[in-house]
């Protein structure tokens, strides 16, 4: 066997050293995504995760985070298992794995608990949905909510309801509120109970139900005996489907069903599975700007995966892009610098109809819901006019 | 205030639901009446049966058809559980049986959690939202079927206990276990048959519940609490007590749901539980306190 030549040794050394010769690939940045993908909210959590994942793929495919030398985003996923306890546990785990921020939570109780757990580590937490306003009134510097809270949603929903009713010659005078009895439904119902009479509507009854609910028979009976012009439901997907099907079963046909942050009334799965039931449903909810070409691109990407293009896909997608932008401006994955960059964000590369981002006390002041209506098997935006792609149909034929 | 028509409909709805509750309670009370044990695994076994119906549904078998293979299956499961697990592990002491069934419940529930996760699943049976108009009332078709089948099962069970040799043996063991032994009845076999019958009731109940209900690994807990209330109301070990108690609890639940709202609907059921324990601890049809 011959001795290795000097040249061979040098070549070998060069090969070994090669990775260090081109400019080093920047380390990837870990981003925590928290969603309830098991338990009662599993369906929503799955959609939220999809939105976040698509945004991460888009950022990475577009060359990573510019301000960090093209560092890629790496998802660290946590399953909140539909409870605040599990959400908190997952925050602890994600923080120990070194995430730079956490996006998600979905349900208000999970968001409340998880953002508080993250606050102990100065870890930025971007709430994706969590509409309870107590999330942003605790003075936590790490907590940011990109979407509107239920205070804002309720006031826009009622303004638009009044506009809709006035334009049709005030056919609706009486309403029944149906809401889930958790933080989200009860809080929202309380706001609407105070506001509806001021806008000329008489509340005949307010009915709470648990999540998950096993039967809407009693609620349907109450509604049938009260015969309201409008039903205003605020509940999660499965419960609204149960309610809508029971109303149909009991042959209850109000002049309109006007959802406020309803889990199903602007959900393509519902529209696809129950097209006749869904037709004409009104909802005031989170929704992307239909005229933004990025919205249509995202819709295609989501539908190509056989999933439904739901509001939490849109919000999680936008929230991840918001964090990516802040990371780039911070020029570092340092938690304090990222928090500062988020607080000063004026990000407008998202798909929501919010305009440039502006956080005040953690709440994005530009955030606002839109009104949707199911028309011809599609979900159309009917208010505000600047983003609308259809005219409202009210009262129901 | 609600019109009488609405209240009448709520009462009828309650009776329809109550019949299925009664079926769950029937299994529980039968096991208590004969084995003198409280079967804490009853809810977990119901959950198992509901998952079985759901699983067969995923294979294209309708929930009512699924009852046919599940009844012998759950009878065999119950028989084997009593004969090979609960009986031997109790070593003849009732206090032990309590712990064994409780342990079984925990094991089954967590086994299901491992297999199926915590997700809530439901069956999209074709008739789930069909209604039958009875006068001014619109009654849910799956509930009407549930009521009819539950009544039929209760009658069959009564006939089995009253008219067959097995039934006589079961009643003999329930009355006087030593005497039954002396006349040559295989008490261990009778215990296991009774446990099997209790489980078979659960298989029927699961098939009746699934068209309009959902299943997750913890779903049995809600039913077993109601079933305990029914058994206490009707009298521990009494078959007619379970049937009547079931209907009564169904009606109370429905009416309190109507008047107090669905979040508070269960309050009425637990009020009954407390009142019966305070005023008539032996229940409506109980032999003695």
Image (tube, rainbow, N blue to C red):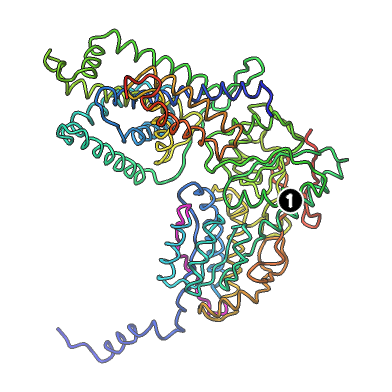
Q: Nearer the viewer, residue B210 or B106?
A: B106
Residue at 52 percent across and 28 percent down: it is B252
Is A141 contained in the magenta span? Answer: no
- Count of marks, rendered view: 1
Can residue B143 be seen at all in this image of the molecule?
Answer: yes
Is A67 contained in the magenta span? Answer: yes
Q: Nearer the viewer, residue A110 or B284?
A: B284
Residue at 45 percent across and 62 percent down: it is A88
- In the depicted structure, whether residue B272 falls above or below residue A21: above
What residue range appears in magenta?
Answer: A66-83
Residue at 68 percent across and 52 percent down: it is A285
At which x and y percent is residue A138? 59, 67
| Residue B139 quadrant | top right
Q: Quadrant of the C terminus of chain A?
A: top right
At which x and y percent is residue A161? 78, 47
- In the depicted structure, whether residue A260 falls above or below residue B219: below
Give me the chain letter of mark 1.
A
State the residue position of label 1: A194
Q: Secondary structure at mark 1?
A: helix
| Residue B192 quadrant | top left
Residue at 44 percent across and 26 percent down: it is B21
């Amino acid at each position: 066997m011959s001795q290795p030549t000097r040249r061979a040794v040098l070549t070998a050394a060069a090969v070994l050293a090669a990775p260090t010769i081109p400019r080093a690939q920047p380390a990837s940045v870990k981003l925590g995504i928290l969603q309830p993908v098991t338990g009662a909210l599993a369906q929503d959590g799955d959609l939220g995760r999809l939105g976040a994942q698509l945004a991460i793929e888009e950022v990475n495919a577009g060359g990573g985070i510019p301000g960090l030398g093209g560092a890629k985003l790496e998802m660290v996923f946590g399953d909140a298992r539909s409870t605040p306890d599990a959400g908190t546990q997952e925050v602890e785990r994600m923080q120990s794995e070194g995430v730079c921020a956490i996006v998600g939570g979905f349900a208000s109780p999970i968001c409340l608990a998880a953002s508080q757990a993250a606050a102990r580590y100065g870890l930025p937490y971007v709430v994706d949905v969590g509409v309870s306003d107590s999330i942003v009134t605790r003075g936590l510097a790490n907590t940011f909510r990109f979407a509107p809270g239920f205070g804002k949603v309720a006031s826009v929903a009622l303004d638009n309801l009044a506009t809709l009713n006035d334009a049709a010659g005030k056919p609706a005078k009486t309403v029944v509120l149906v809401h889930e009895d958790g933080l989200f439904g009860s809080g929202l119902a309380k706001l609407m109970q105070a506001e509806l009479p001021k806008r000329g509507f008489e509340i005949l009854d307010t009915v709470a139900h648990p999540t998950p609910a096993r039967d809407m028979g009693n609620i349907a009976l109450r509604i049938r005996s009260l015969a309201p012009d409008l039903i205003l439901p605020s509940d999660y997907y499965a419960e609204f489907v149960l309610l809508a099907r029971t109303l149909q079963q009991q042959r209850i046909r109000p002049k309109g069903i006007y959802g406020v942050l309803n889990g199903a009334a602007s959900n393509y799965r519902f529209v696809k599975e129950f097209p006749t039931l869904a037709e004409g449903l009104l909802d005031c909810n989170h929704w992307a700007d239909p005229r933004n070409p990025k919205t249509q691109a995202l819709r295609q990407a989501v539908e190509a995966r056989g999933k439904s293009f739901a509001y939490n896909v849109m919000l999680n997608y936008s929230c991840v892009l918001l964090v990516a932008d802040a990371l780039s401006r911070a020029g570092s994955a340092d938690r304090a610098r990222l928090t500062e960059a988020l607080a000063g964000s004026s990000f407008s590369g998202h798909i929501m109809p919010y305009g440039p981002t502006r956080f005040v006390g953690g709440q994005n002041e530009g955030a606002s819901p839109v009104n949707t209506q199911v028309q011809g098997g599609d979900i159309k935006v009917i208010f505000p006019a600047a983003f609308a792609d259809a005219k409202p149909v009210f009262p129901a034929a | 205030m609600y019109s009488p028509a609405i209240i009448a409909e709520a009462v009828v709805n309650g009776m329809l639901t109550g019949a299925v509750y009664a079926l769950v309670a029937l299994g529980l009370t039968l096991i208590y009446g004969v084995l003198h044990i409280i079967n804490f695994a009853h809810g977990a076994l119901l959950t198992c049966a509901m998952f079985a119906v759901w699983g067969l549904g995923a294979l294209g078998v309708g929930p009512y058809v699924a009852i046919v293979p599940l009844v012998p299956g759950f009878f065999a499961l119950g028989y084997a559980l009593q004969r090979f697990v609960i009986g031997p592990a109790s070593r003849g002491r009732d206090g032990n049986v309590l712990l064994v069934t409780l342990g079984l419940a925990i094991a089954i529930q967590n086994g299901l959690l491992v297999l199926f996760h915590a997700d809530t699943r439901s069956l999209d049976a074709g008739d789930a939202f069909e209604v039958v108009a009875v006068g001014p009332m619109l009654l849910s078709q799956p509930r009407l079927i549930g009521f009819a089948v539950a009544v039929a099962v209760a009658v069959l069970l009564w006939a089995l206990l009253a008219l067959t040799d097995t039934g006589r043996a079961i009643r003999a063991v329930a009355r006087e276990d030593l005497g039954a032994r002396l006349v040559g009845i295989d008490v261990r076999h009778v215990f296991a048959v009774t446990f099997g019958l209790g489980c078979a009731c659960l298989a029927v109940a699961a098939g009746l519940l699934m068209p309009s209900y959902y299943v997750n690994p913890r779903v049995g807990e809600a039913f077993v609490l109601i079933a305990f209330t029914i058994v206490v109301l009707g009298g521990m070990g009494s078959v007619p007590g379970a049937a009547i108690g079931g209907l009564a609890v169904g009606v109370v639940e429905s009416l309190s749901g109507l008047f107090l709202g669905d979040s508070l609907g269960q309050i009425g059921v637990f009020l009954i539980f407390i009142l019966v324990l305070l005023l008539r601890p032996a229940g409506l049809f109980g032999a003695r306190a």
